[in-house]
Image (cartoon, rainbow, N blue to C red):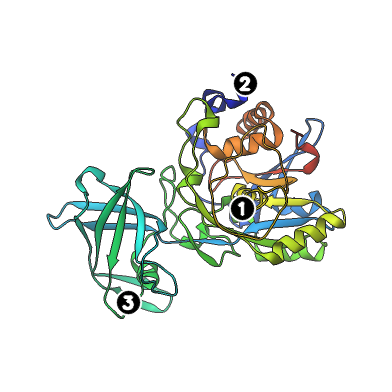
Amino acid sequence: MNCDLVLADYDYTLPTEHIAQTPAVPRDQARLLVVKGNLQQAHGIFRDLPNWLKSGDLLVLNNTRVLPARLHGYKASGLPVEVLLLEPQPEEEKRDHDFSHRWLALVKPGRRLKPGTQIWFGQSSVQSDSGLKSAPAVTADVLATDSATSGRILQFKLPPDQSLRDWLEIYGQMPLPPYITNPTSDPDQYQTVYGDRLGAIAAPTAGLHFTPELLQILQAQGIQQAFVTLHVGVGTFRPVEVEDITTHQMHSEWAEVPLATVEQIRKTQAAGGRIIAVGTTAVRALEGAAQAGQLQPFQGKTNLFIYPGYKWRVVEGLITNFHLPKSSLLMLVSGLIGRSRLLDLYDLAIAADYRFYSFGDAMLILPEARIEN
């Protein structure tokens, strides 16, 4: 089998000291590895980004916002329960302005949470910017199991005057990845400065490096910005476990590519500008909306899995972080510049003390570095 399609060939060894525990401060002081054509690269900082892009280029950013999706509760027996909300589920009556009370969730301990079980989330008080807030006691019934994720379907029950969205903002916790062992005291550090569409359970981490000032500098230089939404879910972070990666099934995630963004992309292309996606989630939204052969407005779920051999339709360049071994994200970036070159760049980044994963440094893949399939 072609080694680009074998799971074992996407493995690499990362010393634990290279896993970033905290973000760069300010955000745009993260390091930047620039991947150019002819197997060349350069080193800089993220604030240098305007030096590497051109007037007329278009950055496409994912404006999702991370939901405080991690909850701690207990069974009637007193057994502690941990819940990670994944995505809302359809229900007959929508509340909270379409913010469903029924959710697919990962739960621990899963074996002890069979359909019919009730989970309690107790009274809590939380200090916020507006003062001390109280979250009422809430329950969730386990309705069913989900074979695709090994998760549970939960139905939340709240007081009539309580919004689930508001309750989560008080009671929920930021779902930081498990490799971050020193959680940040400022939850906004795990949000992009432009995210305004609540619904993700993980941050689109390439966008964490942007500051309002940097976005203004880019705009002033003629580098435009457009937005898509992909609510990052289990499909993005679940590891690939099959040896033949072509048989991996991505879990679907909700995405939207609005007409205004499609028109902006078409205008940019017609003028000779380049389409630079900010993050792998923006890539999947754009390419998912172009699966019919041409980019069209899109709203719905996508389970697009990109790996070497993929035929690119929209994206020409990419800003991305450094990803986990054997992950679908590593395979997506390999589809843009090739697996061997990507792993060589990772070796280079480790030798040069780059910081990896969600709070780590960034890589800019310029369009001239993209391979043609």
- Whether residue 323 is visible, yes or no, is no
Q: Mark 2 points at which residue?
A: 2
Q: Of circles 3 and 2, which is in front?
A: 2
Please give the name of the residue rendered at 47% of the width and 45% of the height, measured from the top-left corner. Answer: 251
Quote the CA–CA distance across marks 2 and 1: 27 Å
Disc number for residue 162: 3
Position of 338 compared to 158: left or right?
right
Q: Name the residue type under label 3.
A: Gln
Does 15 appear above or below 197? above
Does 116 appear above or below 7? below
- Secondary structure of the residue carrying tag 2 is loop
Disc number for residue 285: 1
- Secondary structure of the residue carrying tag 3 is loop
Quadrant where the C terminus is found in the figure: top right
The residue at the far top in this view is 1
Q: Of circles 1 and 3, which is in front?
A: 1
Does 109 appear above or below 369? below
Does 1 appear above or below 224? above
**Which is nearer the N-term, disc 1 or disc 3?**
3
- Secondary structure of the residue carrying tag 1 is helix
